[in-house]
């Protein structure tokens, strides 16, 4: 996916990510059910970072996607979709959507 893009676009995206504000402290303010999915081989947002997010977000669930890195929805779409579907089904069973 990266190889199919222009280098200037990739550089711009990387610079924007490097300059973004750290919002870790805001995670504790999230008060809706949240699913944290992370690839087991993710080096950009590794499972340890995802665990920190999970621990700071009340009412969150976390799942590590096997055989995937940062783009787990593309690298292991079956497991990603299975976990997302399970989360949404569990949520809709317990919550009334208005």
Image (tube, rainbow, N blue to C red):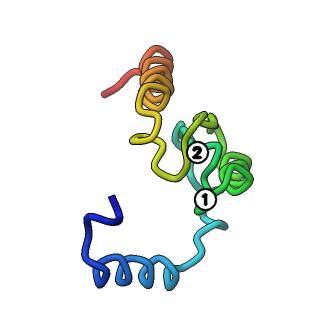
Q: Where the N terminus falls, by quadrant?
A: bottom left
Q: How many marks?
A: 2
Q: Choose between 52 and 47: the one closer to the eye.
A: 47
Q: Does residue 3 appear to the left or right of 25 in the view shown?
A: left
Q: Is residue 5 above or below residue 71?
A: below
**Residue beneath label 2, please?**
38
Q: Position of residue 60 (x, y in %)?
A: 62, 38
Q: Is residue 83 above or below residue 30?
A: above
Q: Where the C terminus falls, by quadrant?
A: top left
Q: Residue at x 60, y 34 (%)?
A: 66
Q: Position of residue 46 (x, y in %)?
A: 66, 55
- Secondary structure at badge 2 equals strand
Quick one: label 2 or label 1, which is nearer the N terminus?
Answer: 2
Q: Residue at x 58, y 37 (%)?
A: 67
Q: Position of residue 49 (x, y in %)?
A: 69, 57
Q: Residue at x 58, y 45 (%)?
A: 38
**Residue beneath label 1, please?**
45
Q: Residue at x 54, y 79 (%)?
A: 21
Q: Residues within 10 Å of mark 2 (few under 14, many from 20)?
A: many
Q: CA distance from mark 2 to mark 1?
A: 8 Å
Q: Does residue 61 appear to the left or right of 15 in the view shown?
A: right
Q: Position of residue 10 (x, y in %)?
A: 35, 76
Q: Is residue 80 above or below residue 12?
A: above
Q: Choose between 16 and 23: the one closer to the eye.
A: 16
Q: Does residue 38 appear to the left or right of 9 in the view shown?
A: right
């Amino acid at each position: 996916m990266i190889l199919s893009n222009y280098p200037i676009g990739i550089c711009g995206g990387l610079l924007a990510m490097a300059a973004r504000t750290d919002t870790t402290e805001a995670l504790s303010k999230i008060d809706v059910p949240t699913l944290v999915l992370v690839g087991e081989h993710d080096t950009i947002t590794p499972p340890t970072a995802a665990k920190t997010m999970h621990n700071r977000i009340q009412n969150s669930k976390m799942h590590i996607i096997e055989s995937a890195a940062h783009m787990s929805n593309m690298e292991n779409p079956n497991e990603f979709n299975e976990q997302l579907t399970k989360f949404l089904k569990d949520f809709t069973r317990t919550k009334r959507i208005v």
